[in-house]
Image (tube, grey):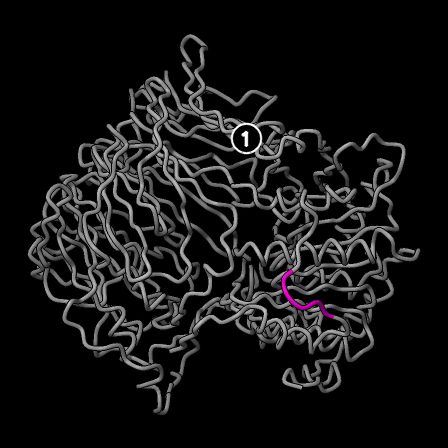
Amino acid sequence: MRLTTRGSGLVVITILVLPLLAFGDAGYRRPEPEIVRLLDAAPPPVVSPDPTGRFLLFAHRDALPPVRALAEPLLEIGGARINPRTNGPYAPLRYASLTLVRIADGTSSPVRLPAEGILGFPRWSPDGSRFAFTVTRENGIELWIGDPRNASVRRLTGPVLNATRGAPCAWTHDSRHLVCRFVVATRASVPPPGSASAQPIVRQSADEPGAVHASLPVRRDALDRQAVEYFMTAQLTMVDSGSGGRRPIGTPGQFDFAKPAPGEPYLLVSRRLPDGSPEARAIEVWDERGRPIRALAQLPSPRGDPRSRAFRWQASAPATVVWVDARTEGRTGDQAPGNDALKALSAPFSGRPRTLYRTEFRFAGLEWLEGGRFALVHEYHRLRHRKRSWLVDIDGGDIRPRMLWAWDVDARYEDPGQAVRTRNRFGAEVIAVYDESVYLAARGAGPEGERPYLDRMKLDTLDTERVWQSPRESYEALVRLLSDDAGLILTRRETPTTRPNYFVRNLKDGSERQLTNFERPLPDFVRTKSIRLAYEREDGVALSATLRLPVGYRGGRRLPMVLWAYPKTYQSETAAGQRTHSLYRSMDVDQGLRLIFLLRGYAVMDDVAMPVIGERQKANDTFVQQIIANAEAAVEAAARRGIADPDRVGVAGHSYGAFMVANLLAHSDLFRAGAALSGAYNRTLTPFGFQTENRHLWDAPTTYLRMSPILYADRIRAPLLLIHGLDDDHAGTPPMQSRHLYEAIERTGGNARLVLLPREGHVYRARESVLHSAAEMLDWFDAHVKEGAHRRKRPILAQQGDELEDMPLLPVSAARPEATPLSR
């Protein structure tokens, strides 16, 4: 168990950051007011249509919470980060207000909300008659109910909900009751931190290798099981949404979920086993009183795949449990035909499970068609990166399974889209069926970028016809059908000069009606321009990027430029060259730190294609060579347009993009400076795989070392700004990754700056942190890119290719001198 009481951010910065820097600034900084206004602008609201198609419920978020909102207590137990004071998640998303819009006439009504507290995202009842949401107070989490007819809300419980293992409540099929997890009223006093951790921790390996993923979190349960039991034990409770009456269901336990059946009074329950390993759990069917009806599975601590997984209710039946049995006994999901078996068991749950379908690849999803007879079963081949979808007769009739689609998931032009859903008589989501047809909504990626569309597909012939497509001058996508025959649809439209807004389209007469009018928070950004660039790298691979120009730029002079990118792995050149963005999308505040440079006179190269092409097991063998070729082609393309000054280009990226930045600076001379946010720079610290790399360090040691820029720190001579959240809990990117790279550059004579942000995770959320990061990046690039001394660009890929091939397999400590301890 790790219990942290969040103290003063300024003290943390002073202690942890300034000793590492040759120069430092005490306290948080902020850029000029224009950029502050950009970053302070609220993002577009999140919409939740009601199941009947009568209302839209918009949840509005403030742009950036204050850093004090992240100063609440943090307890890391059971693989979760919780607030022990509220019995809920640590630093949840903060919704500030709700708005109801009536689809029939566009009437908008603000929901009357409590004055204080953090709103959770609202959930509609199956019949759309009401919605539920949580309010997090200082001392706990409350349940509230809203009425869409008059936009009123009322409190249903006090601060008694337990949300330590996810959303605490779920609607039942009658739309009147909710099954909630309550804090156990009779629990003892809070165990002191570390009260049960003074004991040895012992783990024993087996004789066979286990499947381990790079992002597997470190389990802390064994350190303090007493705290896990105290905070995560909950009492399932049936709550009447009308009267507020409540009734306990069964006995307390540690529940991962308790899902009500679509049409009958049963619960599908996953509970942790008190005497087992931290991962041991039982999957059971309970009646509404909490009595176990059928034990479905007992899952041990995973080594590879558990034999049974993906338990769920069949959405098109009143009470049928469906799950997947793995038939490869722990082997990876692509090593044997007949890999997974889809099983089902119906009420009263006393017979033998029946097999609905057997997949050849690994099971990857299940969707039920309206009417209940058919389902779409999806399967995925990880090594081939192939996905297939089958139409399956789950009633066991004489209709053979039919493959609807098979495509490379990287090939966006081949993506068939998503089947459009509706609500059935149980209030459950199913694929809408009309006149023996289904509707497919796709993003419409093509040579001109994305252009969403809606197709109708006949189930008997699988023929498709285009029902509607976004106009070319905007980006418009389907939100939901408003009529069974798709004659009336709800869409979300945006353009470069307008924020996303919602429209009702009548496809029969061509008319439209605007429902919302969300205005741009920063009208000046309308005057920025974007150019789509298409170009090739030296080996002929087609690439693309979006070049954004600063406000008021008229041409005639070359601009300093910042290139933002994120590497992605592809198996084919064709897939790598496909365009997946649209020039007609709104350039809005959700792009955050990428846009700030436009207000300082830079061009920004965004959506930059950064493919790493090759067989899945070998693509990273040429990672460094390929990202350099991509970056060189991108800079040359912007320079050929007469816009970018190739001698004044900086590079920036977040996470895997930060890893790319460090490698580009270590192995090329393309950039004046770089900014790397929340990256990993020593691949020996992620030895069981990362991103799409599935080989272990011991399978591909040369590749792991080639891809570790910390081993080339002595070659990083362009100034590098490193920013990292001190509470980054992403398994591959702990803050020591940035600390170690900073030390290596510092001790080998390079120019680096390290900024560690207190209370921040992998993505920065607090207003002070985001503004400080903006100020740091802007000043860094102004000093080293915009105004830096001229330096001839010299790609050094060719000169270093042979050396990379012959690099000795040295331990990390041999790559740099002993670093000065952080506590100096």
Start-end of magenta stretch? 24-28
Report the residue that reaches farthest toward the front.
115
Give above or below for 556 relative to 244: above
- Amino acid carrying label 1: it is Arg
Residue 686 drawn above or below residue 663 = below
Q: Is residue 372 visible?
A: no
Q: Say whether residue 758 is left or right of residue 278.
A: right
Q: Which SS type dominates the magenta stretch? A: loop
Corner quadrant of residue 697:
bottom right
Please tell me whether mark 1 sits on a helix, a strand or a loop: strand
Name the residue beneath numbered marker 1: 499
- Residue 824, horizontal then vertical, whole percent: 67, 86
Q: Depth check: 403 or 545 in front?
A: 545
* Residue 419 higher or lower than 5, as above or below: above
Q: Residue at image x 73%, y 61%? A: 624
Magenta segment: does it hold 554? no
Would you call the spot at circle 1 few (<14 residues within 10 Å), some (14-19), or many (20 or more)?
many
Residue at the spot 49% in from the left edge and 67% down from the top edge? 729
- Measured as percent of width and height from the top left, residue 276 is found at 24, 77
Q: Residue furthest top?
A: 509
Determine if residue 528 is in view: yes
Image height check: is 466 above or below 509? Answer: below
Q: Nearer the viewer, residue 763 or 67?
A: 67
- Total tally of numbered discs in the picture: 1
Q: Does 380 sit left or right of 422 as displayed?
A: right
Residue 208, horizontal then vertical, whole percent = 41, 79
* Closer to us: 297 or 179: 179
Q: Position of residue 820 (x, y in %)?
A: 70, 85
